[in-house]
Amino acid sequence: MFLREFWHKLGSPKWFYQISTGWMIGFAVAALVLLVVGMVWGLAFAPADYQQGNSFRIIYVHVPTAMVAQSVYISMGVAGIVLFVWRMKLADVAIAACLPVGMMLTALALFSGGVWGRPTWGTWWEWDGRTVSTLVLLFLFIGIYALREAIPDITLRGRASALVAIVGTINIPIIKYSVDWWHTLHQPGSFSLTEKPTMPVEMWAPLLVMVLGMYCFAGYIILARMRIEILLREQRTQWARELVA
Amino acid sequence: MQFESMAEFFAMGGHGLYVWLAYGATCAALVGSALAVRIGAKRQIQQLKLAAFHQTRCSSESQT
């Protein structure tokens, strides 16, 4: 009952704009606190790895950006399904808002991966299963962004980008299982929901803080971009005018 | 604290370049995108104000 009401309300950009103000501020504050705490903890207080030494500390920026980049892509795929099935305008706004932050996080994961790979594997780049599938993720974000730029019609633009976003989700399990399928260079995942971490708690606790912080950060940026896009689309309506009066 | 001195902290056991490159790029990109959305929101509200101002002026002129 409550869910149904919520679903209907999502159809109203005005309602979403009003309700999201608090969420956005909450995400921003949480992201700032968690990321600052996580970085200081990871850089100065977490123990160095017995094999990799201090270059191991790159994990605290590499893993969160990579994880959240994939989650942003999955959210975009879900928004794509919502747009396709229910024709919800807000889903199109969400797809547009996910693209820049997803692109940035994927690029950061690739960059920090290369910078970590240099002292650890002796190379900046390797055509390894996980690095290549992550590169594909970056191209998917860029491709959908370019597609949206190229289509002026708003309905067609939404449907085309939703379709590519949905089809592209096939890449997410490929990234996840790439370390098991191809035993090349990338080490297995650090975190799993079902298994105990292989790292000691002093090492994974700051990583957990960083992952949570990165999720909050992405939430903040996506909501902020959605709100900008809503104001742009609704600028002729009464409620938007009253908002700035 | 894992380090004895500030110099040791920056050196990161000889891996300073890599560690600081990764953290530097991440921080710069995060701060940059937070700034970008703040500027974007301000600009959008400014534009909305301008449009609202023009509309009220036009409608008041047509009334007189």
Image (cartoon, grey):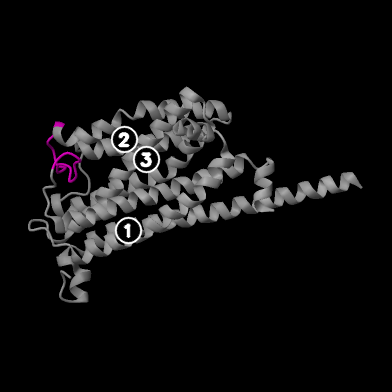
Q: Nearer the viewer, mark 2 or mark 1?
A: 1
Quarter of the rendering containing residue B8 = bottom left
- Residue type at tag 3: Val
Q: Could you tell me if residue B17 is visible in this image?
A: no
Could you tell me which residue is drawn at 66 percent across and 44 percent down? A239
Q: Is residue A172 left or right of residue B4?
A: right
- Residue at numbered disc 1: A34
| Chain ID of residue with mark 3 | A
Q: Is residue B60 above or below residue A50?
A: above
Q: Which residue is mark 2?
A: A136
Instruction: Report the residue marked by disc 3.
Output: A72
- Residue type at mark 1? Leu
Crowd band around label 2 with a 10 angstrom C-alpha radius: few (<14), some (14–19), many (20+): some
In the image: residue A118, left or right of residue A235: left
Identify the image quadrant of residue B30: bottom left
Q: Earlier in the sequence, mark 1 or mark 3?
A: 1
> Quick check: A139 above or below A122?
above
Tell if the residue under mark 2 belongs to the same chain as the one under mark 1.
Answer: yes
Quick check: is A202 in the magenta stretch? no
How far, Cα to Cα, is label 1 from label 3?
Answer: 19 Å
Q: Position of residue B46 (x, y in %)?
A: 64, 54
Query: Badge 3: how crowded within 10 Å, few (<14), some, or many (20+)?
Result: many
Secondary structure at numbered mark 3: helix
Looking at the picture, which amino acid does disc 2 mark? Val
Element marked by disc 1: helix
Q: Position of residue A46 (x, y in %)?
A: 17, 62
Q: Which residues are magenta?
A: A181-195
How far apart are labels 2 and 1 at the CA level?
A: 29 Å
